[in-house]
Amino acid sequence: MPEELPRWSTMEGDCLSCMKYLMFVFNFFIFLGGACLLAIGIWVMVDPTGFREIVAANPLLLTGAYILLAMGGLLFLLGFLGCCGAVRENKCLLLFFFLFILIIFLAELSAAILAFIFRENLTREFFTKELTKHYQGNNDTDVFSATWNSVMITFGCCGVNGPEDFKFASVFRLLTLDSEEVPEACCRREPQSRDGVLLSREECLLGRSLFLNKQGCYTVILNTFETYVYLAGALAIGVLAIELFAMIFAMCLFRGIQ
């Protein structure tokens, strides 16, 4: 019986050592990924070649740049805590790492549950109601309108269902004094134009079908992202599984450190 104790002790030590190096490698990749995202986000925001102005002019791109910075910073810090905690066998750092991952895990789980509960808010009817009620046209200071303009320009679409949506957009009709059938964001652009030159602004605003995008954004976006739904779901499950294993590794290492 006494001979068994050293064997078990050696096996336990080898297991903890293996877990320590696995956790270091795992967190090193997280650290590198965070550093890359952070570098891209910072470059986009301070780039002297003029790319920043392009991003700043598009609310969706600007939001994306801030998300890159936030995600990069979070992953950078997370990877750093995990690497240092594993190498130094520091219980305090490992505990911080565990709590950090736990908070992210619970936040993602809550977001998934809320998305499932409020999935009826993603219907065509909901978006149509919101557009006709709140859209203000070419108003860059209104986040709702600016976001819709970016979506319509990016995807080459008009309204939720089509140009007819703007016949019932009360605020838009009031602001334009009924002089415009559709907003400028609905107008078709020259295919080869890099700066998005309109085919004919005047004809488009009068509602001439040849000069405006006739397809609704709901259908266009749905068709665009439909092929990625299962991939996104699999990726989300994969991320949650990795986070779960990271928490288990951190806690096992935490308990194994004398």
Image (cartoon, grey):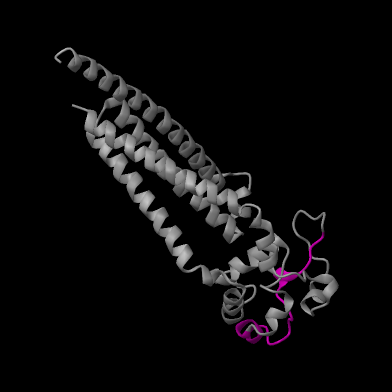
Q: Is residue 188 magenta?
A: yes
Q: Magenta segment, which residues? A: 170-190
The residue shown at (64%, 63%) is 150
Residue lying farthest to the top in this orientation = 3
Q: Quadrant of the N terminus?
A: top left
Q: Nearer the viewer, residue 173 or 43?
A: 173
Residue lying farthest to the right in this orientation = 210
Q: Nearer the viewer, residue 39 or 101?
A: 101
Q: Nearer the viewer, residue 90 or 112?
A: 112
**Residue 241 position in % (x across, y down):** 43, 43
Residue 14 falls in image quadrant: top left
Q: Is residue 126 magenta?
A: no
Residue 100 falls in image quadrant: top left
User: Where is 107 relative to 7, above or below?
Assistant: below
The residue shown at (66%, 85%) is 168
The residue shown at (73%, 76%) is 163
**Residue 160 position in % (x across, y down):** 66, 72
User: Where is 164 relative to 218, above or below?
Assistant: below
